[in-house]
Amino acid sequence: MAINRWLRATLCLLTLLASFGFLAWFLPRALNPTETSPEKRREDSLWIETSPHPLDRFACRWLSLCGLHHLRSDPAVALDPASSVFVQHELRRRDGLDAVDYGGRPPRNTRRDDSRSSFRKRLTKTKRRIIKQVPDFVLRHAPYVHLSSDEEFWPSDLAHHLAHMNATDKHGKPLQDDYLDSIALDRLDELDADVTLHSRDNVEARPAWLYSRDGIPQGHQDDDDDDDDGKTHPAQSIASPHLERTTWFDADKAHPPHRLAYPSVPSQQQHDPLLLLLRRRGHKPDEKGRSSAPAVLILVDKGSGILDAFWFFFYSYNLGQTVVGLRFGNHVGDWEHCMVRFQHGIPRGLYLSEHEGGQAYAWSAVEKSADGNRPVVYSALGSHAMYALPGDHPYVLPFGLLKDVTDRGPLWDPALNNLAYHYDYTRDDDQALDPATSNPSAPTSWFHFAGRWGDAVYPLADGRQWRLFGQYHYVTGPSGPKFKHLHRSRLCSAEGKMCRLLYQLDPKGTWY
Protein backbone atom coordinates (compact mmCIF):
# COMPACT_ATOMS: atom_id res chain seq x y z
CA MET A 1 0.00 0.00 0.00
CA ALA A 2 2.78 2.40 0.90
CA ILE A 3 4.47 1.67 -2.42
CA ASN A 4 1.21 2.29 -4.29
CA ARG A 5 0.71 5.61 -2.51
CA TRP A 6 4.28 6.58 -3.36
CA LEU A 7 3.74 5.64 -7.00
CA ARG A 8 0.48 7.59 -7.17
CA ALA A 9 2.12 10.63 -5.60
CA THR A 10 5.03 10.36 -8.02
CA LEU A 11 2.71 10.05 -11.01
CA CYS A 12 0.66 13.03 -9.84
CA LEU A 13 3.81 15.09 -9.43
CA LEU A 14 5.12 14.09 -12.85
CA THR A 15 1.73 14.85 -14.40
CA LEU A 16 1.68 18.28 -12.80
CA LEU A 17 5.23 18.99 -13.97
CA ALA A 18 4.42 17.79 -17.49
CA SER A 19 1.24 19.90 -17.58
CA PHE A 20 3.07 22.95 -16.32
CA GLY A 21 5.87 22.36 -18.83
CA PHE A 22 3.35 22.11 -21.67
CA LEU A 23 1.61 25.30 -20.58
CA ALA A 24 4.97 27.04 -20.22
CA TRP A 25 5.79 26.01 -23.79
CA PHE A 26 2.33 26.68 -25.24
CA LEU A 27 1.26 29.94 -23.58
CA PRO A 28 4.08 32.17 -24.86
CA ARG A 29 3.36 30.98 -28.39
CA ALA A 30 -0.42 31.27 -28.07
CA LEU A 31 -0.30 34.73 -26.51
CA ASN A 32 2.25 36.20 -28.90
CA PRO A 33 0.31 38.16 -31.57
CA THR A 34 3.26 38.01 -33.98
CA GLU A 35 4.92 34.98 -35.54
CA THR A 36 8.33 33.83 -34.33
CA SER A 37 10.85 33.24 -37.10
CA PRO A 38 13.52 30.50 -37.04
CA GLU A 39 16.14 33.22 -36.64
CA LYS A 40 14.35 34.51 -33.55
CA ARG A 41 14.29 31.00 -32.11
CA ARG A 42 18.03 30.64 -32.66
CA GLU A 43 18.64 33.99 -30.98
CA ASP A 44 16.47 32.89 -28.08
CA SER A 45 18.52 29.74 -27.62
CA LEU A 46 21.72 31.80 -27.48
CA TRP A 47 20.08 34.23 -25.08
CA ILE A 48 19.24 31.42 -22.66
CA GLU A 49 22.83 30.19 -22.85
CA THR A 50 24.13 33.50 -21.45
CA SER A 51 23.03 32.50 -17.96
CA PRO A 52 25.91 31.03 -15.91
CA HIS A 53 23.48 28.98 -13.79
CA PRO A 54 22.45 25.53 -15.08
CA LEU A 55 19.20 25.56 -13.08
CA ASP A 56 18.31 28.95 -14.50
CA ARG A 57 18.91 27.72 -18.04
CA PHE A 58 16.83 24.59 -17.38
CA ALA A 59 13.92 26.54 -15.87
CA CYS A 60 14.06 29.02 -18.72
CA ARG A 61 14.16 26.43 -21.49
CA TRP A 62 11.58 24.00 -20.12
CA LEU A 63 9.40 26.00 -17.73
CA SER A 64 9.60 29.44 -19.38
CA LEU A 65 10.78 30.89 -16.05
CA CYS A 66 13.96 32.84 -16.73
CA GLY A 67 16.02 34.81 -14.22
CA LEU A 68 13.86 34.08 -11.18
CA HIS A 69 16.75 35.11 -8.91
CA HIS A 70 16.67 38.57 -10.53
CA LEU A 71 13.01 39.30 -9.72
CA ARG A 72 12.34 42.53 -7.81
CA SER A 73 10.26 45.68 -7.98
CA ASP A 74 11.06 48.23 -10.69
CA PRO A 75 9.50 51.60 -9.83
CA ALA A 76 9.38 54.52 -12.23
CA VAL A 77 11.02 56.83 -9.72
CA ALA A 78 14.80 57.09 -9.46
CA LEU A 79 16.59 54.27 -7.68
CA ASP A 80 19.61 54.55 -5.44
CA PRO A 81 22.58 53.71 -7.74
CA ALA A 82 24.49 52.29 -4.78
CA SER A 83 21.79 49.69 -4.20
CA SER A 84 21.31 48.79 -7.85
CA VAL A 85 21.27 45.08 -8.56
CA PHE A 86 23.07 45.75 -11.83
CA VAL A 87 25.72 43.02 -11.93
CA GLN A 88 28.31 43.18 -14.64
CA HIS A 89 30.48 40.51 -13.01
CA GLU A 90 27.81 37.88 -13.66
CA LEU A 91 28.27 38.11 -17.40
CA ARG A 92 30.49 35.50 -18.91
CA ARG A 93 31.67 34.46 -22.32
CA ARG A 94 30.07 31.37 -23.86
CA ASP A 95 30.44 29.75 -27.26
CA GLY A 96 28.84 31.89 -29.93
CA LEU A 97 28.60 34.96 -27.67
CA ASP A 98 30.86 37.93 -27.04
CA ALA A 99 31.33 39.56 -23.68
CA VAL A 100 29.24 42.64 -23.18
CA ASP A 101 30.21 45.79 -21.32
CA TYR A 102 27.09 47.35 -19.81
CA GLY A 103 28.72 50.04 -17.75
CA GLY A 104 29.37 53.66 -18.70
CA ARG A 105 31.38 54.84 -21.70
CA PRO A 106 33.42 52.30 -23.68
CA PRO A 107 37.13 52.22 -22.86
CA ARG A 108 39.44 54.39 -24.91
CA ASN A 109 41.31 51.44 -26.38
CA THR A 110 38.17 49.87 -27.85
CA ARG A 111 38.74 49.51 -31.59
CA ARG A 112 36.36 48.79 -34.39
CA ASP A 113 36.78 45.85 -36.71
CA ASP A 114 37.94 46.63 -40.25
CA SER A 115 34.45 45.80 -41.41
CA ARG A 116 33.33 49.01 -39.74
CA SER A 117 34.50 50.78 -42.89
CA SER A 118 31.01 49.97 -44.16
CA PHE A 119 29.82 52.72 -41.84
CA ARG A 120 31.51 55.34 -44.02
CA LYS A 121 28.90 55.40 -46.71
CA ARG A 122 28.05 59.07 -46.91
CA LEU A 123 26.73 60.03 -50.33
CA THR A 124 27.59 63.20 -52.21
CA LYS A 125 24.45 65.25 -52.61
CA THR A 126 24.70 66.59 -56.11
CA LYS A 127 21.02 66.88 -57.01
CA ARG A 128 19.33 70.11 -56.06
CA ARG A 129 16.33 69.35 -53.89
CA ILE A 130 12.91 70.85 -54.38
CA ILE A 131 11.71 71.91 -50.95
CA LYS A 132 7.95 71.54 -50.48
CA GLN A 133 5.58 73.01 -47.94
CA VAL A 134 3.46 71.18 -45.42
CA PRO A 135 -0.11 71.42 -46.75
CA ASP A 136 -2.39 73.50 -44.56
CA PHE A 137 -4.87 70.65 -44.23
CA VAL A 138 -2.23 68.44 -42.56
CA LEU A 139 -1.78 70.88 -39.67
CA ARG A 140 -5.49 71.69 -39.57
CA HIS A 141 -6.21 68.01 -38.90
CA ALA A 142 -3.13 67.23 -36.77
CA PRO A 143 -3.79 65.03 -33.73
CA TYR A 144 -4.00 66.20 -30.15
CA VAL A 145 -2.28 63.74 -27.80
CA HIS A 146 -3.37 63.31 -24.19
CA LEU A 147 -0.34 62.11 -22.22
CA SER A 148 -0.97 60.25 -18.97
CA SER A 149 -1.60 62.24 -15.79
CA ASP A 150 0.94 60.01 -14.02
CA GLU A 151 3.54 60.00 -16.81
CA GLU A 152 7.20 60.10 -15.76
CA PHE A 153 8.93 59.68 -19.14
CA TRP A 154 8.03 62.61 -21.38
CA PRO A 155 8.61 63.45 -25.07
CA SER A 156 12.32 63.63 -25.86
CA ASP A 157 14.52 65.57 -28.23
CA LEU A 158 16.41 63.25 -30.60
CA ALA A 159 19.70 65.14 -30.32
CA HIS A 160 19.52 65.13 -26.52
CA HIS A 161 18.90 61.37 -26.56
CA LEU A 162 21.91 60.72 -28.81
CA ALA A 163 24.17 62.71 -26.49
CA HIS A 164 23.70 59.96 -23.89
CA MET A 165 24.20 56.97 -26.20
CA ASN A 166 27.12 54.87 -27.39
CA ALA A 167 27.14 52.67 -30.50
CA THR A 168 27.58 48.89 -30.14
CA ASP A 169 27.79 46.10 -32.69
CA LYS A 170 25.39 43.17 -32.93
CA HIS A 171 27.29 41.32 -30.20
CA GLY A 172 27.10 44.24 -27.79
CA LYS A 173 30.74 45.28 -28.21
CA PRO A 174 31.13 49.08 -27.98
CA LEU A 175 32.54 50.83 -31.02
CA GLN A 176 35.00 53.67 -30.58
CA ASP A 177 36.49 56.38 -32.74
CA ASP A 178 36.48 60.15 -32.75
CA TYR A 179 33.06 60.27 -34.39
CA LEU A 180 31.42 57.91 -31.93
CA ASP A 181 32.41 60.14 -29.01
CA SER A 182 29.57 62.37 -30.14
CA ILE A 183 26.81 60.74 -32.19
CA ALA A 184 25.04 63.40 -34.23
CA LEU A 185 21.73 63.48 -36.09
CA ASP A 186 23.38 64.63 -39.30
CA ARG A 187 25.80 61.67 -39.39
CA LEU A 188 23.72 58.86 -37.98
CA ASP A 189 23.42 57.05 -41.32
CA GLU A 190 27.14 56.27 -41.14
CA LEU A 191 26.21 53.46 -38.77
CA ASP A 192 24.96 50.29 -40.41
CA ALA A 193 22.01 48.07 -39.59
CA ASP A 194 23.94 45.90 -37.12
CA VAL A 195 24.53 48.84 -34.81
CA THR A 196 22.52 49.43 -31.66
CA LEU A 197 22.57 52.66 -29.69
CA HIS A 198 23.33 51.80 -26.07
CA SER A 199 22.86 53.96 -22.99
CA ARG A 200 26.06 55.25 -21.39
CA ASP A 201 24.30 55.02 -18.05
CA ASN A 202 22.72 52.19 -16.13
CA VAL A 203 19.07 52.97 -16.84
CA GLU A 204 17.97 51.39 -13.55
CA ALA A 205 19.71 54.29 -11.80
CA ARG A 206 17.16 56.45 -13.66
CA PRO A 207 19.46 59.20 -14.99
CA ALA A 208 17.67 62.51 -15.44
CA TRP A 209 17.81 62.45 -19.25
CA LEU A 210 15.49 59.42 -19.36
CA TYR A 211 12.66 61.49 -17.90
CA SER A 212 12.96 64.36 -20.43
CA ARG A 213 11.11 66.70 -18.10
CA ASP A 214 11.89 69.59 -20.45
CA GLY A 215 9.54 67.91 -22.91
CA ILE A 216 6.45 68.25 -20.69
CA PRO A 217 3.79 70.10 -22.73
CA GLN A 218 3.43 73.61 -21.41
CA GLY A 219 0.38 75.39 -20.12
CA HIS A 220 -2.43 72.86 -20.51
CA GLN A 221 -4.07 70.86 -17.75
CA ASP A 222 -7.46 69.23 -18.12
CA ASP A 223 -10.01 70.37 -15.60
CA ASP A 224 -11.55 67.04 -14.70
CA ASP A 225 -11.50 63.37 -15.52
CA ASP A 226 -14.97 62.36 -14.52
CA ASP A 227 -16.57 61.91 -17.93
CA ASP A 228 -17.87 58.49 -18.74
CA ASP A 229 -16.45 58.05 -22.22
CA GLY A 230 -17.61 54.47 -22.49
CA LYS A 231 -21.24 55.62 -22.61
CA THR A 232 -20.64 57.94 -25.54
CA HIS A 233 -18.97 55.20 -27.61
CA PRO A 234 -20.95 51.96 -27.91
CA ALA A 235 -18.76 48.88 -27.73
CA GLN A 236 -19.38 47.80 -31.30
CA SER A 237 -16.67 46.96 -33.81
CA ILE A 238 -17.30 47.02 -37.54
CA ALA A 239 -14.60 46.01 -39.98
CA SER A 240 -16.29 46.49 -43.35
CA PRO A 241 -14.21 48.36 -45.94
CA HIS A 242 -16.80 47.24 -48.51
CA LEU A 243 -19.14 49.87 -47.08
CA GLU A 244 -16.89 52.55 -48.57
CA ARG A 245 -17.50 54.06 -51.99
CA THR A 246 -13.76 54.27 -52.66
CA THR A 247 -10.68 52.20 -51.93
CA TRP A 248 -8.87 55.04 -50.15
CA PHE A 249 -8.08 52.60 -47.32
CA ASP A 250 -5.85 50.48 -49.59
CA ALA A 251 -3.96 52.65 -52.07
CA ASP A 252 -0.46 53.60 -53.15
CA LYS A 253 1.26 54.84 -56.30
CA ALA A 254 1.02 51.42 -57.93
CA HIS A 255 -2.58 50.84 -56.83
CA PRO A 256 -4.67 54.03 -57.02
CA PRO A 257 -8.20 54.12 -55.56
CA HIS A 258 -10.82 52.56 -57.82
CA ARG A 259 -13.10 55.55 -57.38
CA LEU A 260 -12.56 59.04 -56.02
CA ALA A 261 -15.21 60.33 -53.64
CA TYR A 262 -15.18 62.90 -50.90
CA PRO A 263 -16.31 61.76 -47.46
CA SER A 264 -19.67 62.87 -46.20
CA VAL A 265 -20.02 64.11 -42.63
CA PRO A 266 -22.61 62.03 -40.76
CA SER A 267 -25.58 64.17 -39.85
CA GLN A 268 -25.57 62.91 -36.27
CA GLN A 269 -22.04 64.22 -35.73
CA GLN A 270 -23.39 67.70 -35.06
CA HIS A 271 -25.31 66.26 -32.08
CA ASP A 272 -22.69 63.77 -30.92
CA PRO A 273 -22.71 63.90 -27.08
CA LEU A 274 -18.93 63.61 -26.94
CA LEU A 275 -18.53 66.52 -29.35
CA LEU A 276 -20.86 68.63 -27.19
CA LEU A 277 -18.85 67.61 -24.12
CA LEU A 278 -15.61 68.66 -25.79
CA ARG A 279 -17.12 72.03 -26.70
CA ARG A 280 -17.75 72.60 -23.01
CA ARG A 281 -14.29 71.43 -21.97
CA GLY A 282 -12.15 73.13 -24.57
CA HIS A 283 -9.32 71.66 -26.74
CA LYS A 284 -9.25 74.81 -28.90
CA PRO A 285 -5.92 75.25 -30.73
CA ASP A 286 -3.73 77.86 -29.03
CA GLU A 287 -0.20 78.16 -27.69
CA LYS A 288 -0.97 75.73 -24.88
CA GLY A 289 0.21 72.17 -25.28
CA ARG A 290 3.57 72.96 -26.86
CA SER A 291 6.46 70.61 -26.02
CA SER A 292 10.09 71.65 -26.39
CA ALA A 293 10.72 68.17 -27.83
CA PRO A 294 9.68 68.36 -31.50
CA ALA A 295 7.46 65.71 -32.98
CA VAL A 296 8.48 64.35 -36.39
CA LEU A 297 6.04 64.78 -39.27
CA ILE A 298 6.70 62.66 -42.36
CA LEU A 299 4.47 63.20 -45.40
CA VAL A 300 4.21 60.32 -47.87
CA ASP A 301 2.48 60.89 -51.21
CA LYS A 302 0.73 57.68 -52.31
CA GLY A 303 -0.54 59.15 -55.59
CA SER A 304 -4.07 59.81 -56.88
CA GLY A 305 -4.64 62.45 -54.21
CA ILE A 306 -3.76 60.10 -51.32
CA LEU A 307 -1.38 61.59 -48.74
CA ASP A 308 -0.32 59.90 -45.50
CA ALA A 309 0.77 62.20 -42.67
CA PHE A 310 2.83 60.23 -40.16
CA TRP A 311 3.20 61.93 -36.78
CA PHE A 312 6.08 60.31 -34.90
CA PHE A 313 6.61 60.82 -31.18
CA PHE A 314 9.93 59.94 -29.54
CA TYR A 315 10.63 59.16 -25.89
CA SER A 316 13.99 58.21 -24.37
CA TYR A 317 12.48 55.47 -22.22
CA ASN A 318 9.57 53.07 -22.36
CA LEU A 319 8.45 51.92 -18.92
CA GLY A 320 6.66 48.60 -19.21
CA GLN A 321 3.55 47.56 -17.31
CA THR A 322 3.34 45.46 -14.15
CA VAL A 323 1.77 42.08 -13.44
CA VAL A 324 1.53 41.09 -9.75
CA GLY A 325 4.18 43.68 -8.96
CA LEU A 326 6.65 42.59 -11.67
CA ARG A 327 7.40 44.86 -14.61
CA PHE A 328 7.62 43.72 -18.22
CA GLY A 329 8.48 45.44 -21.49
CA ASN A 330 11.00 48.14 -20.54
CA HIS A 331 13.24 49.47 -23.30
CA VAL A 332 15.49 52.44 -24.03
CA GLY A 333 14.21 54.61 -26.87
CA ASP A 334 10.56 54.60 -27.92
CA TRP A 335 9.01 55.55 -31.27
CA GLU A 336 5.21 55.76 -31.46
CA HIS A 337 3.13 57.18 -34.28
CA CYS A 338 -0.26 58.31 -35.47
CA MET A 339 -0.92 58.34 -39.21
CA VAL A 340 -3.70 60.40 -40.79
CA ARG A 341 -4.67 59.49 -44.36
CA PHE A 342 -6.00 62.23 -46.63
CA GLN A 343 -7.75 62.01 -49.98
CA HIS A 344 -7.64 65.28 -51.90
CA GLY A 345 -7.05 67.13 -48.63
CA ILE A 346 -9.95 65.48 -46.82
CA PRO A 347 -9.11 63.26 -43.80
CA ARG A 348 -10.44 59.73 -44.33
CA GLY A 349 -8.91 57.63 -41.56
CA LEU A 350 -6.09 57.27 -39.08
CA TYR A 351 -3.86 54.62 -37.56
CA LEU A 352 -2.57 54.44 -33.97
CA SER A 353 0.55 52.41 -33.16
CA GLU A 354 0.33 50.01 -30.24
CA HIS A 355 3.26 47.79 -29.19
CA GLU A 356 3.86 45.26 -32.01
CA GLY A 357 0.96 46.51 -34.09
CA GLY A 358 -1.87 49.03 -33.93
CA GLN A 359 -5.42 49.85 -34.93
CA ALA A 360 -6.93 51.68 -37.93
CA TYR A 361 -10.06 53.82 -37.71
CA ALA A 362 -12.34 55.63 -40.12
CA TRP A 363 -12.17 59.38 -39.58
CA SER A 364 -15.80 59.59 -38.44
CA ALA A 365 -15.17 57.06 -35.65
CA VAL A 366 -12.62 58.91 -33.54
CA GLU A 367 -13.00 61.63 -30.95
CA LYS A 368 -12.47 65.16 -32.28
CA SER A 369 -11.58 68.59 -30.96
CA ALA A 370 -14.30 71.15 -30.31
CA ASP A 371 -14.24 72.41 -33.90
CA GLY A 372 -14.45 68.86 -35.24
CA ASN A 373 -11.18 69.19 -37.17
CA ARG A 374 -8.56 67.42 -35.05
CA PRO A 375 -8.53 63.86 -33.72
CA VAL A 376 -7.95 63.43 -29.99
CA VAL A 377 -5.81 60.40 -29.12
CA TYR A 378 -4.33 58.99 -25.93
CA SER A 379 -0.80 57.96 -24.97
CA ALA A 380 -0.54 55.13 -22.42
CA LEU A 381 1.25 55.55 -19.11
CA GLY A 382 4.89 54.49 -19.43
CA SER A 383 4.60 52.54 -22.69
CA HIS A 384 3.27 55.50 -24.74
CA ALA A 385 1.21 53.10 -26.87
CA MET A 386 -1.54 55.04 -28.63
CA TYR A 387 -5.26 54.51 -28.22
CA ALA A 388 -8.48 56.17 -29.36
CA LEU A 389 -10.11 56.09 -25.91
CA PRO A 390 -9.15 56.79 -22.28
CA GLY A 391 -9.30 53.87 -19.87
CA ASP A 392 -7.76 50.41 -19.46
CA HIS A 393 -6.44 48.52 -22.49
CA PRO A 394 -5.49 44.87 -21.75
CA TYR A 395 -3.10 43.17 -24.14
CA VAL A 396 -1.28 39.85 -24.63
CA LEU A 397 -2.12 38.25 -21.25
CA PRO A 398 -5.67 37.10 -20.41
CA PHE A 399 -7.93 38.44 -17.64
CA GLY A 400 -6.49 41.95 -17.99
CA LEU A 401 -3.29 40.98 -16.19
CA LEU A 402 -1.18 43.15 -18.51
CA LYS A 403 -2.75 46.42 -19.55
CA ASP A 404 -2.07 49.95 -20.71
CA VAL A 405 -3.82 52.85 -19.02
CA THR A 406 -4.76 56.14 -20.69
CA ASP A 407 -6.50 59.24 -19.36
CA ARG A 408 -7.06 62.92 -20.09
CA GLY A 409 -3.68 64.06 -18.82
CA PRO A 410 -1.57 66.94 -20.19
CA LEU A 411 -2.52 67.78 -23.76
CA TRP A 412 0.30 67.74 -26.32
CA ASP A 413 -0.17 69.65 -29.57
CA PRO A 414 2.53 68.39 -31.99
CA ALA A 415 1.49 70.96 -34.60
CA LEU A 416 3.14 73.67 -32.45
CA ASN A 417 6.64 72.17 -32.63
CA ASN A 418 7.70 69.59 -35.19
CA LEU A 419 10.33 68.64 -37.75
CA ALA A 420 8.52 68.15 -41.06
CA TYR A 421 9.71 66.09 -44.04
CA HIS A 422 8.52 64.73 -47.38
CA TYR A 423 9.42 61.09 -48.09
CA ASP A 424 9.44 59.31 -51.46
CA TYR A 425 9.23 55.61 -50.65
CA THR A 426 9.95 54.65 -54.28
CA ARG A 427 13.56 55.81 -53.90
CA ASP A 428 16.28 54.02 -51.96
CA ASP A 429 18.92 56.69 -51.47
CA ASP A 430 19.61 59.73 -49.32
CA GLN A 431 17.48 61.86 -51.64
CA ALA A 432 14.30 60.04 -50.59
CA LEU A 433 13.72 62.32 -47.60
CA ASP A 434 13.53 66.10 -47.94
CA PRO A 435 12.91 68.65 -45.19
CA ALA A 436 9.85 70.85 -45.60
CA THR A 437 10.01 74.61 -46.07
CA SER A 438 9.16 75.10 -42.40
CA ASN A 439 12.59 73.63 -41.50
CA PRO A 440 14.76 73.61 -44.65
CA SER A 441 17.98 72.88 -42.74
CA ALA A 442 16.63 69.99 -40.68
CA PRO A 443 18.98 66.96 -40.69
CA THR A 444 17.94 63.90 -42.67
CA SER A 445 20.75 61.44 -41.93
CA TRP A 446 19.10 60.11 -38.76
CA PHE A 447 16.12 58.88 -40.81
CA HIS A 448 18.27 56.39 -42.75
CA PHE A 449 19.87 54.83 -39.64
CA ALA A 450 18.86 51.17 -39.85
CA GLY A 451 19.96 50.16 -36.36
CA ARG A 452 18.14 50.30 -33.03
CA TRP A 453 17.55 53.46 -31.04
CA GLY A 454 18.03 51.82 -27.66
CA ASP A 455 19.84 49.04 -25.82
CA ALA A 456 19.69 45.52 -27.23
CA VAL A 457 17.82 43.01 -25.09
CA TYR A 458 19.88 42.39 -21.96
CA PRO A 459 21.22 38.83 -21.67
CA LEU A 460 19.82 36.45 -19.10
CA ALA A 461 23.09 36.78 -17.19
CA ASP A 462 22.41 40.48 -16.58
CA GLY A 463 20.96 41.11 -13.13
CA ARG A 464 18.41 43.51 -14.61
CA GLN A 465 16.83 40.89 -16.84
CA TRP A 466 14.15 38.26 -16.42
CA ARG A 467 11.54 36.61 -18.64
CA LEU A 468 8.38 34.85 -17.53
CA PHE A 469 6.21 32.98 -20.06
CA GLY A 470 7.77 34.85 -22.96
CA GLN A 471 7.45 38.34 -21.43
CA TYR A 472 10.79 40.13 -20.93
CA HIS A 473 11.66 42.70 -18.29
CA TYR A 474 13.83 44.48 -20.89
CA VAL A 475 13.41 44.21 -24.65
CA THR A 476 15.42 45.67 -27.52
CA GLY A 477 14.97 49.33 -28.40
CA PRO A 478 12.95 50.20 -31.51
CA SER A 479 13.91 50.83 -35.10
CA GLY A 480 13.32 54.30 -36.54
CA PRO A 481 10.46 55.79 -38.58
CA LYS A 482 11.85 54.65 -41.94
CA PHE A 483 11.18 51.06 -40.91
CA LYS A 484 7.57 51.54 -39.79
CA HIS A 485 6.08 50.56 -43.17
CA LEU A 486 5.74 54.08 -44.53
CA HIS A 487 5.10 52.56 -47.95
CA ARG A 488 1.98 50.74 -46.73
CA SER A 489 -1.04 50.81 -48.99
CA ARG A 490 -3.45 50.03 -46.17
CA LEU A 491 -3.85 52.14 -43.06
CA CYS A 492 -2.38 49.63 -40.65
CA SER A 493 1.14 48.30 -40.83
CA ALA A 494 0.07 44.66 -40.45
CA GLU A 495 -1.46 42.78 -43.36
CA GLY A 496 -4.15 40.13 -43.60
CA LYS A 497 -6.48 39.49 -40.68
CA MET A 498 -4.63 41.89 -38.41
CA CYS A 499 -5.53 44.89 -40.55
CA ARG A 500 -9.07 45.92 -39.63
CA LEU A 501 -10.70 49.27 -40.26
CA LEU A 502 -13.08 50.21 -37.44
CA TYR A 503 -16.04 52.50 -37.98
CA GLN A 504 -16.97 52.72 -34.30
CA LEU A 505 -14.81 52.78 -31.19
CA ASP A 506 -14.59 49.56 -29.22
CA PRO A 507 -13.32 49.99 -25.63
CA LYS A 508 -12.72 46.24 -25.34
CA GLY A 509 -11.21 45.63 -28.78
CA THR A 510 -7.62 44.76 -29.68
CA TRP A 511 -5.73 44.95 -32.95
CA TYR A 512 -4.75 41.25 -32.95
Image (cartoon, helix red, strand yellow):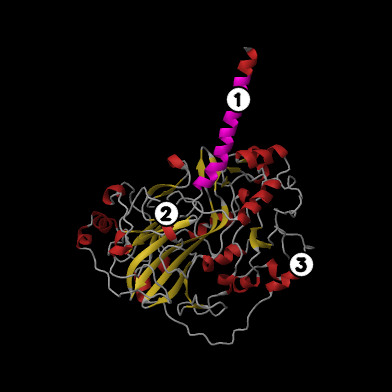
Looking at the image, residue 58 sits to the left or right of residue 479; the answer is: right
Q: Name the residue under label 2.
A: 511
Front tag of 3 and 1: 1
Amino acid under disc 1: Leu
Percent coordinates x, y for residue 84 in the rendering: 66, 44
| Kind of element beneath mark 3 | loop
Q: Can residue 489 be seen in this view?
A: yes
Q: Are marks 1 and 2 in contact (CB under 8 Å)?
A: no
- As displayed, is residue 303 above or below residue 449? below
Looking at the image, residue 341 sits to the left or right of residue 98; the answer is: left
Q: Can residue 70 be seen in this view?
A: no
Foreground residue among 342 and 143 = 342
Q: In which quarter of the image is the N terminus?
A: top right
Percent coordinates x, y for residue 57 in the rendering: 68, 41
Residue at 56% from the left image edge and 33% from the top image edge: 19
**Which sits earlier in the primary sequence, circle 3 or circle 1?**
1
Q: Do the residues labelled 3 and 2 touch (CB within 8 Å)?
A: no
**Which sits earlier in the primary sequence, circle 3 or circle 2?**
3
Q: Name the residue under label 1.
A: 11
Residue 259 magenta: no
Q: How far apart are marks 3 and 2 (CA)?
A: 43 Å
Q: Mark 3 points at which residue?
A: 113
Residue 18 magenta: yes
- As displayed, is residue 6 above or below residue 27? above
Looking at the image, residue 350 sits to the left or right of residue 383; the answer is: left
Foreground residue among 141 and 502 = 502
Front tag of 3 and 2: 2
Seen from this angle, which residue lies furthest top?
Answer: 1
Q: Give the range drawn in magenta.
A: 7-31
Amino acid under disc 2: Trp
